[in-house]
């Protein structure tokens, strides 16, 4: 087995899910993946920097996150969405080394499928259409300059603004949020851009 000193050091300090990581690690390496530390976590790649999976430690489970999990067939129905607003990544969850070992064949099969998609450059399917918050739709309909600036933003920035605004429960709060972000939209910046 190839030496991965960064991951070995990570495992030496790992106290949350060490047995589960030690059970899943040889499965991933047997699929021909390279092991690195990215974002402070063990990441498994092909051909240098093409990310396939990432190990994520949570308080109640260890997750094997497939970067393009939405492309996988998930014949065993073991993949979970990362969250309601996440499109591409999906993850498998483990709470014991025995669970990892019982799914070893499934893990290897899913990794192989993910590698095939990565090598083929399979694009992610488009996101389902999302409705803009009613208050944002009204503002855009009544302000041509704002509408033009909003439409010039990348789809990700538009989506981030819409999520930020629509997340508010009351119309008054949604309108305040719109008022607050209008200057950023007019400047062509995203919600988190400096």
Image (cartoon, helix red, strand yellow):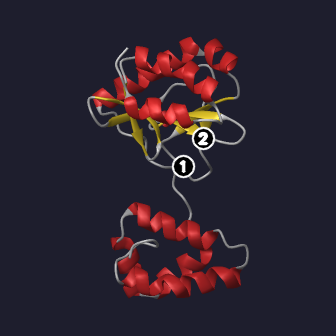
Q: Which residue is mark 1?
A: 86
The image position of residue 89, as x and y in percent, is 50, 41
Q: Out of 166 and 194, give the one closest to the viewer.
A: 194
Residue that appears at 59% across and 44% down: 82
Q: Which residue is mark 2?
A: 81
Q: Is residue 166 left or right of residue 88?
A: right
Q: Out of 31 and 125, give the one closest to the viewer.
A: 31
Residue that appears at 41% across and 39% down: 37
Rendered view: 58 above or below 24:
below
Q: Are marks 2 and 1 in contact (CB under 8 Å)?
A: yes
Q: Out of 163 and 138, give the one closest to the viewer.
A: 163
- Label 1: few (<14), some (14–19) or many (≥20) C-alpha neighbours in 10 Å: few
Residue that appears at 55% across and 81% down: 138
Q: CA distance from mark 2 to mark 1?
A: 7 Å
Quadrant for residue 132, please give it.
Answer: bottom right
- Helix or strand or loop: what does disc 1 sit on? loop
Can residue 52 be seen? no
């Amino acid at each position: 087995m190839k030496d991965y000193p960064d991951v070995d050091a990570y495992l030496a300090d790992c106290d949350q899910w060490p047995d589960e990581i030690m059970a899943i690690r040889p499965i991933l390496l047997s699929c021909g993946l390279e092991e690195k530390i990215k974002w402070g976590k063990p990441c498994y790649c092909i051909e240098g920097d093409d990310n396939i999976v990432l190990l994520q430690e949570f308080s109640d489970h260890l997750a094997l996150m497939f970067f393009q999990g939405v492309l996988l067939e998930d014949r065993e129905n073991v993949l979970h969405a990362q969250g309601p607003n996440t499109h591409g990544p999906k993850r498998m969850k483990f709470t014991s080394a025995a669970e990892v070992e019982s799914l070893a064949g499934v893990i290897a099969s899913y990794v192989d499928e993910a590698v095939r998609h990565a090598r083929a450059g399979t694009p992610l399917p488009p996101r389902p259409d999302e409705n803009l918050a009613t208050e944002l739709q009204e503002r855009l309909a009544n302000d041509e300059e704002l509408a033009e600036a909003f439409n010039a933003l990348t789809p990700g920035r538009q989506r981030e603004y819409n999520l930020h605004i629509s997340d508010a429960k009351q119309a008054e709060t949604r309108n305040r949020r719109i008022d607050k972000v209008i200057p950023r939209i007019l400047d062509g910046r995203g919600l988190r851009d400096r």
